[in-house]
Image: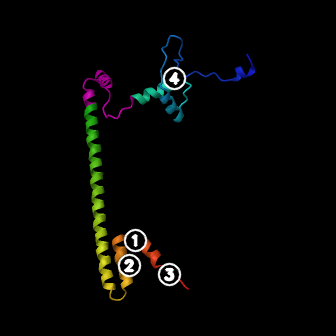
């Protein structure tokens, strides 16, 4: 055996069993291996890959545990599965109540912001009407800015700007 062959690290494919000849091979789709590689998981160790996939597969979007887990709770202490389910229902109602409060608060804030914007626009137009007697161009600018807000104020400021000297 040459020196380069001895120094090369031994690697096992991620889809082999790695525990001996009698263990069945673990078949992992190439897409899963790519995703694991992008996530920084060493896919040369099949045990590590299997552990990551097992944890990933056990994660569920449902707030309820799997039936066999509930069975284990019930076996541990009779009536405990019902306690777990009741607690999950209570937590779900609580979380939904908090989400509803947040949504209602956001709606209230948006309503108040619209009312305040209307008030600013009305006051701006009233000031513009009162000022129109003395300086019509400034009154028009005030009315446009009062209705259009900050973006329009920026545009009007650029247009009015300092007078250019010849």
* Label whose residue precedes the other's in the sequence (2 or 1): 2
Q: CA distance from mark 3 to mark 2?
A: 15 Å
Is 3 above or below relative to 87? Answer: above
Q: Which residues are magenta?
A: 58-83
Marks 3,2: beta carbons within 8 A: no
Q: Which residue is mark 4?
A: 47
Q: Which residue is mark 1?
A: 152
Q: Which residue is mark 2?
A: 141
Residue at (73, 16) in percent of width and height: 1
Q: Residue furthest bottom?
A: 134
Q: Picture coordinates of residue 143 (x, y %)? A: 34, 77
Using the image, tell me which numbered label, if any, was put on residue 162: 3
Marks 2,1: beta carbons within 8 A: no
* Label whose residue precedes the other's in the sequence (4 or 2): 4
* Label whose residue precedes the other's in the sequence (1 or 3): 1
Q: CA distance from mark 1 to mark 3?
A: 18 Å
Q: Picture coordinates of residue 50 (x, y %)? A: 48, 24
Is 120 above or below relative to 165? Answer: above
Is 156 above or below relative to 27? Answer: below
Foreground residue among 134 and 44: 134
Q: Nearer the viewer, mark 4 or mark 2?
A: 2
- Horizontal placement of 165 versus 144: left or right? right
* Label whose residue precedes the other's in the sequence (4 or 1): 4
As helix, strand or loop, the secondary structure at mark 1 comes to: helix
């Amino acid at each position: 055996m040459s020196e380069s062959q001895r120094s090369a690290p031994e690697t096992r494919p991620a889809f082999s069993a790695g525990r001996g000849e009698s263990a069945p091979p673990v078949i992992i789709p190439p897409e899963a291996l790519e995703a694991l590689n992008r996530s920084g998981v060493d896919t040369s160790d099949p045990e590590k890959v299997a552990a990551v996939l097992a944890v990933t597969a056990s994660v569920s979007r449902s707030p309820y545990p799997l039936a066999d887990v509930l069975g284990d709770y019930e076996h541990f202490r009779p009536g405990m599965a019902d306690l777990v389910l009741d607690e999950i229902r209570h937590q779900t109602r609580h979380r939904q109540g908090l989400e509803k409060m947040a949504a209602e608060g956001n709606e209230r804030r948006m309503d108040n912001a619209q009312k305040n914007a209307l008030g600013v626009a009305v006051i701006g137009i009233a000031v513009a009407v009162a000022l129109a007697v003395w300086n019509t161009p400034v009154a028009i600018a005030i009315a446009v800015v009062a209705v259009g807000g900050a973006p329009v104020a920026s545009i009007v400021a650029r247009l009015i700007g300092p007078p250019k000297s010849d």
